[in-house]
Amino acid sequence: MTLRELNGQMPEPPSLLPELDDPELVLAPYDAVWQAHLSQVIESVIDTAHVPIVHRRTIGWNSSSSIHIDFEATDDRITIRNGSGLLTYRFPQQWLLTPAEPRRSRFINYVTFTPVDREVTAIFGYAGRNFTKFPWVSRIFSRYSARVLEEDRAVVESQHPRPIPDALRMEAHVGADGPQVRFRQRWYQFLTSGEPRISLKDRVR
């Protein structure tokens, strides 16, 4: 399912991470809609261990199957070093991939996640670059990014329960699950606190 199948409804634009304001970057947009709870979608994008398995035909073709998760978590931010890339997740719904080290040619990938209801999440992304700025190249980046998302979709949509379990003890975790465990702790904090939130209707009309 794509954004256009959501009866023309558009969510409010998020407060963007500062990297999106870089004037040197050309941004190629893409979007998708998954039949999955927001929490499962977010856990999928901070799980770097799945890259060489699920994405072996795209971004994971040269990834090592030896898994070592190097991450830091503070307040609303989780930062994960994945080879030459640096993943930044900002609670509740922003994700950014940037180069781990400064380089002349730069590529970033930025994604937001918007809950439509308990079983549907809309995904909006930008693939940004400061090289080969021809418009037709943007279409290639958009299609490729959408293809990577599609590889994840089938896996995430098959997961049960739809929202993540109500407590960490309800599932077994390994060392590579560190970023997801940190996300769950923050998610549970949100659910049990008085933080401001928006109540969604059952479906987008």
Image (cartoon, rainbow, N blue to C red):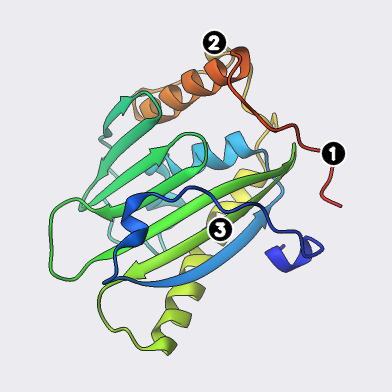
Residue drawn at (42%, 40%) of the image = 46
Q: Is residue 176 left or right of residue 32?
A: left
- How packed mark 2 is, by other alpha carbons closer than 10 Å (few <14, some 14-19, many 20 or more), is few
Q: For mark 2, what is the residue? A: 169
Q: Is residue 135 above or below residue 78?
A: below
Q: For mark 3, what is the residue? A: 124
Could you give the CA–CA distance between mark 1 and mark 3, rounded to whole angstroms?
21 Å
Could you give the CA–CA distance between mark 1 and mark 2, rounded to whole angstroms?
29 Å
Residue 2 shows in the view: no
Label 1: state its secondary structure.
loop
Label 2: state its secondary structure.
helix
Q: Amino acid at mark 2?
A: Arg
Q: Nearer the viewer, mark 2 or mark 3?
A: 3
Q: Residue 12's spot in the image, x, y percent?
A: 63, 51
Q: Tell which circle, 1 or 3, labels the residue nearer the N-terminal end.
A: 3
Q: Residue 170's spot in the image, x, y percent?
A: 59, 14
Residue drawn at (42%, 75%) of the image = 141
Q: Residue 177's spot in the image, x, y percent?
A: 40, 28
Determine which of the numbered discs, if any, sits on residue 32 in the image: none
Q: For mark 1, what is the residue? A: 202
Label 3: state its secondary structure.
strand
